[in-house]
Image (tube, rainbow, N blue to C red):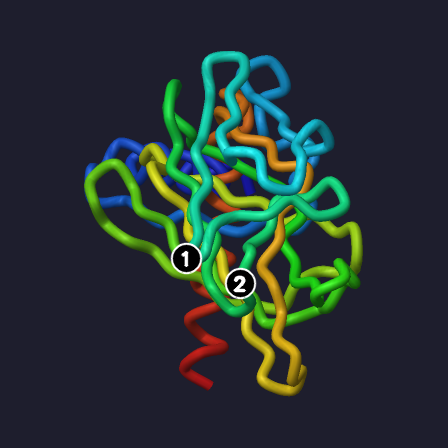
Amino acid sequence: MRTTHRLFVASAIALLSASSFALPSVWTTPDDHVDATHSYLENFNAFGESDAAVSAGNGYGFTASAIGDTYFNLGALSTNKNYVALTLDFTGADVHALRGKFFATDYDGTFFQSVTYFEFTLSNNSVEKFEGKALVEGGITGFYSSLAIKKLTFSVEDGTFDLGQYAAIDDLQVGAVPEPSSVALLGLGLAGVAFARRRRAA
C-alpha cells in the first residue's frame, strides 16, 4: 500500500513539472481548494445594473465582457443579451484556481439548471473546454490548473426555453491552489478527466 502511494505521489509531482500538462480539472466540493489567503472573492452586490464590469482585490482582478454588454441582476454578473457568453479576462496575480456559482437565469433573474459551457485560455495559449449541467441553485463549481488561467468564457444553452437564458456568475473566488493540496488536487483532477473521457467515448 505504501509503495503504491509513493508511486502515485511521484507520478503526480512529475506531471506537475511537465510543461505539457495544461488540463484544468473540476471538483465538486471545492471549499478548501482555493487558497483563503491568496485569493479574491467578488459577490457583485455593490454593482449597479449598468456598471463597468471591472473588479480587483488582494492582487487579483478581472474584466468581464459580453456581446451586447454585461448586466448586473440581483447581485450577480450576467449578460445583457440572451444566449451570449460571459468572458472574464484575469489581471494581476496569476490565477490557478477559481470557484463560483455558474448558472442561467431568465429575463427576471429566475434560476435555471441549464447546460453550461466553460472555455479556459491558459498561459501557454492552449484552450481547454468543459461541458456539463449547472449544479442545484446555490451550488458551487470549481476549477484549477497547473498553468495560469488567463481567460474564462462561460455560456449556457437550453433550446427548450423560448424566451432565452442568460449566463450568470455569482460569488466568484479566484486565486492560488493551497500548496499542501496541490499534488492531491492533481490526482483528483486526472481521475476526473479520465472519467469524463470514458463517458464521452461510451
Q: Bin the neighbour count of mark 1 within 10 Å (Cα to Cα): few under 14, some 14-19, many 20 and up.
A: some
Asked whether residue 92 appears in the rendered view, the answer is: yes
Q: Residue at x 70, y 48 (%)?
A: 73
Q: Sequence-wise, which precedes: disc 1 or disc 2?
A: 1
Q: Residue furthest front?
A: 50
Spot occupied by residue 75 in the image (x, y as percentages of width and height): 73, 40
Where is mark 1, residue-wise?
67
Residue nearer the viewer, 137 or 64: 64
Q: CA distance from mark 1 to mark 2?
A: 7 Å
Task: Name the residue at 38% across, 37% down.
Answer: 89
Residue 136 percent location from the top left of the image: 77, 61
Q: Is residue 101 above or below residue 137?
A: above
Could you say where residue 16 lies in the image, as x and y percent from the top left? 32, 35
For label 2, count other residues whose C-alpha is less than 10 Å away and answer few (under 14), some (14-19) or many (20+): some
Q: Nearer the viewer, residue 43 or 108?
A: 108
Left or right of residue 199, residue 167 in this image: right
Using the image as rendered, state which of residue 35 and residue 160 is in the foreground.
160
Residue where numbered disc 2 is placed: 81
Element at label 2: loop
The disc label shown at residue 51, or none = none
Is residue 190 visible to us here?
A: no
Tell me the residue at 46%/13% (across/down). 59
What's the residue at 50%, 26% (across, down)?
A: 175
Quadrant for the N terminus in the image: top right
Q: Looking at the picture, which amino acid does disc 2 mark?
A: Lys
149 with respect to 174 (left or right): left
> Looking at numbered disc 1 in the image, what kind of residue is underneath it?
Ile
Q: Secondary structure at mark 1?
A: loop
Q: Looking at the image, do the residues carrying marks 1 and 2 touch, with CB atoms under 8 Å apart?
A: yes
Tell me: residue 25, above or below residue 179: below
